[in-house]
Image (tube, helix red, strand yellow):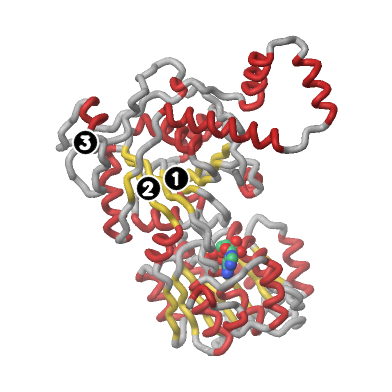
Amino acid sequence: MDSILTFADLGLSADILDGLLKKGFKSPTPIQAQTIPLLLNGERDIIGQAQTGTGKTAAFGLPIIERITPGLRKVQAIVLAPTRELANQVAEELESLKGKRDITILPVYGGQGMVTQLRSLKQGVDIVVGTPGRVIDHIERKTLKLNDIKFVVLDEADEMLNMGFVDDIEKILSHVPEQRRMLLFSATMPGQILSLARKFMGEYDEVKVASKQQSATNVEQIFYEIQEKDKLRALHRLIETESEFYALVFSRTRLGADRLASKLSDLGYEVEALHGDVTQVQRERILAKFKGGHATILVATDVAARGIDINNLSHVVNFDMPDSPEAYVHRIGRTGRAGKTGKAISFIAPGEWRKLQFVQQVTKTTITRGRLPYGQEVIDMKRNSMKERVFAAVEGEVSQEFYNLSEEILSSGKPKQLLASLLQLHFGGNLNPHAFPEIREPERAGGFKPNRHSLERHGAPRPATAGAGKATGYLGRKERASSTGQFASKPFFKKKKFA
Ligand code: ADP
Ligand code: MG
């Protein structure tokens, strides 16, 4: 049923449908399917709850665009968002959804040129998307008039409350006409939100898309039990063996994020770190780089990653487990977006075992235990991929000039040596298994400690429940602990956004 539902079924008009087609939206997401008809037809307020990345912007944006008067140039809808980042994103998304409608949309937030904002406001705009602080600024300067408001949207309401915007929101709402419709969107519904709703909303419909179903269908959740000190090695192996790796990697601290990014960079990856110490200018540069696929790994803290809308992530990695199940759900919601599948990987050091259990209990999902590839497997995969790429290249066109050059070089009479050097030159890196040093499974208090050989012989995965005996695992048969050659390998090709 869901899969055959179209945007046309929801009652959107032809010119909007046309725009959606161009934007590449094929069918509505669950929150869109449920919210859009209510907003197009009804008059009640709405509370919408759905995980990040489920298309909430279009869920409220499309009906607002349908229902406001084009060309009026009076603020008819105001969207409040917690950060300038998000305000910008929402404004951009609305801009791309409006199609040919004569509607102007203005993002307003602190730090952005006041003069430009004032000029635009004076010329008249139909939709304002802003952060609470700057919106209040404009209300107080009387440069933003809210008398014609038909829609107020609180986007990422939970984050706004977390960030202490409750007074600001109340203040703004007190300037908006009684007759407005209020729409509140949030990934979670803490009690504070419901009391805000009771205070400021009329009769409302509640639309809820269960996050469990969302994450279960689109995101494969895997954990690896390893020691803290082995996390980087483990990540290295995964990056090298996954067919695509365009990932957000979460670190608990700013310092941790910086260190991890610099180590990954030493390994040859295109990586950036995003955390609270990063200036706004740097932040925008980093995000642009990551969005453009010029960096393929972004190491971030929860706070810094808040609300960034990046599509097509193949992986979310919990390098450090988050403290709360909610944060976990929020993090992994960044992958498996809008119909794509993604992987959420969690590294579980001994101290993080309980966090893993807690997440599983609260989200009612089972996170599957993963086995890290052995060093030799990593090498085998690299070799195979090199071979495939070379043979694929042979199938393609090669220009005459290269044939000429090839003949000249081959005339030296050492074809094997020549090919080997060319491969090394082209792919770089390292095919030495020592580049992937052994990773031992941690010993957990209470569990028995099997010796290495017993692990190798009876290597069955253990069920993902707490305290269920000592794990068997992924000790590399062909690996030897090596203190030399640590991380000596470079990736054999630069990871591309789309492998
Ligand atoms: P949320 O606010 O729920 O976190 P967004 O509104 O930011 O999600 O949407 C996430 C991404 O999904 C955006 O890039 C958006 O363009 C895209 N998207 C939204 N709806 C659809 C759809 N129906 N089909 C395909 N992509 C969509
Ligand atoms: Mg959103």
Residue type, numbered disc 1: Val
Q: Residue at x 65, y 55 (%)?
A: 111
Residue type, numbered disc 3: Arg
For residue 444, the mark is 3
Foreground pick, 341 / 260: 341
**Of the two numbered discs 1 and 2 in the rendering, the one whose residue sits closer to the viewer:** 2
Q: Name the element at disc 2.
A: strand
Whole-number angstrom distance, CA of label 2 to CA of label 3: 19 Å
Read off the residue under disc 1.
Answer: 317
Q: Residue at x 28, y 39 (%)?
A: 351
Q: Residue at x 16, y 37 (%)?
A: 447
Disc with the residue nearer the chain's start (1 vs 2): 2
| Mark 3 residue's CB less than 8 Å from ligand 1 | no
Disc with the residue nearer the chain's start (2 vs 3): 2
For residue 63, the mark is none
Quadrant of image for the C terminus: top right
Residue type, numbered disc 2: Ile
For residue 222, the mark is 2
| Mark 1 residue's CB less than 8 Å from ligand 1 | no
Q: Name the element at disc 1.
A: strand
